[in-house]
C-alpha cells in the first residue's frame, strides 16, 4: 500500500492525519443520509405532498401512498443518472491519476442541492422543483463518495482495511447523530412551537411555514462545507497525478475493456450482482423508513428524529465493533449475517400497523407496534451500517488495485443500476395496492437475492498468480 511505502504519506502528511482526513468525509456527508434522505426532509416531503393531495379531495391513505410514490419516482430518476455516469467518471479519474478535482465538483453539487431544498414551503410547494434540488445534492453526495472511497486501499494494509472502514463509518454515524440532535434541539418545533429541549426555533424560524423543518437543507449544506475542511487539508492525490483532461479517451477505453473482461473475474461479477440487490434493499429501508413511520404509524417529525438518533447511535456502535469482526473473520460472513438480519427486519416492518402486529390485534393505545418499529430501527442502523462498511472493504479485495476508482465506479453502477428498482417497486406497489405498508414488501426479495448471489463470491477475490 502507498502509505506503507511512504510513511510520511502524500505531500508530507502523516498516515494518521491522512486517515483522519478520510474519516471526516464520512462525518461531513452523513447528514445527507440521516437528515435529508431518511429522518427529516424525506418525511417532510411526504407530509407536505400528501397534504396537497388531500386538499384536492384524495383520501389520507391514498394520498400517503401517492406521496411515497412521488418520492420513489424522483429517486428512481436520480439513481439512473448515477448508474450511467459513475463508472465512466471513475475510469476517467483513474486514467488521469487525479480524484480531488472531481471531489471538489461534487462537493459543490452537494452544497447547492441541500441548500436549495429550503425553497419547498407548503404554500408554494412544487414536487418537481423540490425533487430536482434534492436530486442534485444526492448526486453530489453519491459521486463524492465514489471518489473518496477509492482512496481506501492506500490507507493501510489489507488486514487493517476492515477496521479502518468500520471506524470511518462509525465516525460518520456519530456525525449524523450530532447533526440530527442539533436539528431537533435548536430548530425543529413540536406541536407546542418549542424544540425538543424547550427552545423557540433559532433565528426566528416560523413553524407555520415549516421554516423550522426546511432549515434542515441549509444546515446540512453548511455542516458539509465546514467538516470537509480536514479532508481537503489532509488527503492528497498520489504524486503521479497528471492534468485532469489528459488520457480522457484512454480512460473510457479502459472502462470498456474492464466491462468486457468482467466475466473472466466471476467473483467480482458475483459480488457486484449480490451487492446490487442487497444495497438496493438497504437504500429502500433508509429512504422510506421515515416516510413509513409518518404515514403508517402517524409519527411526528420530532418522533421520527428521536427514532433516527437511536438508530444512528446503534449504527455507530456496531460499525466500530463490526470493523474489528471484519478484521478477524473477513467481510464475507459479516455481509451475509447483515443481509439476513435486514431481510427479517423488513418482514417485521411489513407486519406492523398502529393496531396490530402480524395481523394480531393489540389493545387500544398499545405501544407495542411503536416499540417494535424502534427495534427495527436499531437493527437497520446496526446491520445497515456494518453492511456498508464491510461491503466497501470487500470491494478492495475484489477489484484491481491499479483501477480502484473505476472499481468503485462499477460498484456504484451495480448499486445504482437497479437503485431505481427499490423505489420503483415500492412506488408501483404503493400505487397498485393503495397501501403504504404493503408498498415496502419488495425489500424482502432484494435481500434474499443478494444473499443467494453471495454464495459465488470468493472471500479474497480471484487469484492473480
Image (spheres, rainbow, N blue to C red):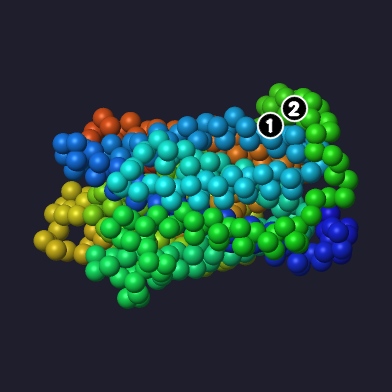
Query: Measured along the vertical axis of the image, is residue 400 above or below residue 327?
Result: above
Q: First in sequence, mark 1 or 2: give its number.
A: 1
What residue do we see at 65% from left, 59% from top?
A: 228
* Quarter containing the N terminus: bottom right
- Residue 378, by quadrant, is bottom left
Q: In which quarter of the view is residue 205 placed?
A: bottom left
* Mark 2 neighbour density, 10 Å: few (under 14) some (14–19) many (20 or more): some
Q: Which residue is mark 1?
A: 88
Residue 72 visible here: no
Residue extending furthest bottom? 198
- Which of 380/80 is in front? 80
In front of the other: 438 or 85: 85
Tell whether label 2 touches label 1 (CB within 8 Å): yes
Q: Quadrant of the C terminus?
A: top right
Label disc, if present, on residue 252 of the rendered structure: 2
Mark 1, Cα crowd under 10 Å, few <14 / some 14-19 / many 20+, is many
Direction from residue 222 to residue 190 in the image, left or right: left
Residue 87, position as x, y percentages in the image: 66, 34
Could you tell me residue 267's position as x and y percent?
65, 37
Q: Is residue 22 visible?
A: yes
Q: Residue at x 79, y 64 (%)?
A: 15
Q: Which mark is residue 256?
A: none
| Tag 1 secondary structure | helix
Q: Residue at x 75, y 67 (%)?
A: 17
**Residue 35: x %, y % from top left:** 45, 56
Q: Position of residue 98 (x, y in %)?
A: 79, 44
Amino acid at each position: 500500500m502507498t502509505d506503507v511505502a511512504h510513511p510520511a504519506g502524500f505531500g508530507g502528511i502523516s498516515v494518521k492525519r491522512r486517515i483522519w482526513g478520510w474519516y471526516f468525509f464520512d462525518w461531513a456527508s452523513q447528514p445527507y443520509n440521516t437528515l435529508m434522505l431518511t429522518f427529516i426532509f424525506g418525511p417532510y416531503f411526504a407530509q407536505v405532498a400528501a397534504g396537497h393531495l388531500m386538499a384536492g379531495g384524495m383520501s389520507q391513505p391514498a394520498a400517503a401512498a401517492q406521496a411515497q410514490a412521488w418520492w420513489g419516482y424522483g429517486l428512481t430518476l436520480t439513481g439512473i443518472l448515477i448508474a450511467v455516469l459513475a463508472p465512466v467518471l471513475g475510469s476517467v479519474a483513474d486514467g488521469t491519476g487525479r480524484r480531488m478535482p472531481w471531489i471538489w465538483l461534487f462537493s459543490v453539487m452537494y452544497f447547492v442541492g441541500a441548500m436549495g431544498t429550503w425553497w419547498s414551503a407548503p404554500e408554494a410547494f412544487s414536487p418537481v422543483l423540490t425533487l430536482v434540488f434534492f436530486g442534485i445534492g444526492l448526486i453530489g453526495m453519491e459521486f463524492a463518495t465514489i471518489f473518496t472511497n477509492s482512496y481506501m486501499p492506500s490507507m493501510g494494509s489489507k488486514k487493517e482495511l476492515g477496521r479502518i472502514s468500520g471506524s470511518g463509518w462509525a465516525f460518520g454515524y456519530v456525525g449524523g447523530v450530532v447533526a440530527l440532535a442539533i436539528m431537533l434541539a435548536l430548530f425543529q418545533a413540536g406541536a407546542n412551537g418549542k424544540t425538543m429541549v424547550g427552545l423557540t426555533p433559532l433565528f426566528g424560524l416560523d413553524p407555520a411555514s415549516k421554516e423550522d423543518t426546511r432549515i434542515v437543507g441549509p444546515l446540512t449544506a453548511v455542516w458539509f462545507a465546514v467538516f470537509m475542511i480536514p479532508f481537503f487539508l489532509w488527503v492528497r492525490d498520489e504524486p503521479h497525478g497528471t492534468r485532469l483532461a489528459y488520457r480522457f479517451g484512454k480512460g473510457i477505453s479502459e472502462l470498456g475493456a474492464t466491462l468486457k473482461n468482467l466475466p473472466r473475474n466471476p467473483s467480482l461479477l458475483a459480488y457486484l450482482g449480490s451487492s446490487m440487490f442487497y444495497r438496493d434493499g438497504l437504500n429502500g429501508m433508509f429512504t422510506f423508513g421515515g416516510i413509513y413511520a409518518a404515514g403508517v404509524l402517524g409519527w411526528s417529525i420530532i418522533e421520527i428524529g428521536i427514532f433516527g438518533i437511536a438508530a444512528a447511535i446503534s449504527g455507530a456502535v456496531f460499525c466500530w465493533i463490526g470493523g474489528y469482526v471484519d478484521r478477524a473473520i473477513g467481510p464475507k460472513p459479516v455481509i451475509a449475517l447483515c443481509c439476513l438480519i435486514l431481510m427479517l427486519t423488513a418482514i417485521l416492518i411489513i407486519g406492523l400497523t398502529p393496531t396490530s402486529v402480524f395481523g394480531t390485534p393489540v389493545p387500544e393505545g398499545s405501544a407495542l407496534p411503536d416499540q417494535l418499529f424502534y427495534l427495527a430501527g436499531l437493527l437497520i442502523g446496526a446491520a445497515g451500517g456494518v453492511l456498508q462498511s464491510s461491503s466497501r472493504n470487500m470491494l478492495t479485495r475484489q477489484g484491481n488495485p491499479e483501477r480502484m476508482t473505476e472499481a468503485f465506479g462499477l460498484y456504484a453502477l451495480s448499486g445504482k443500476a437497479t437503485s431505481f428498482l427499490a423505489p420503483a417497486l415500492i412506488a408501483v406497489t404503493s400505487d397498485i395496492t393503495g397501501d403504504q405498508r404493503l408498498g415496502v414488501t419488495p425489500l424482502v426479495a432484494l435481500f434474499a437475492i443478494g444473499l443467494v448471489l453471495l454464495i459465488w463470491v470468493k472471500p479474497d477475490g480471484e487469484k492473480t498468480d
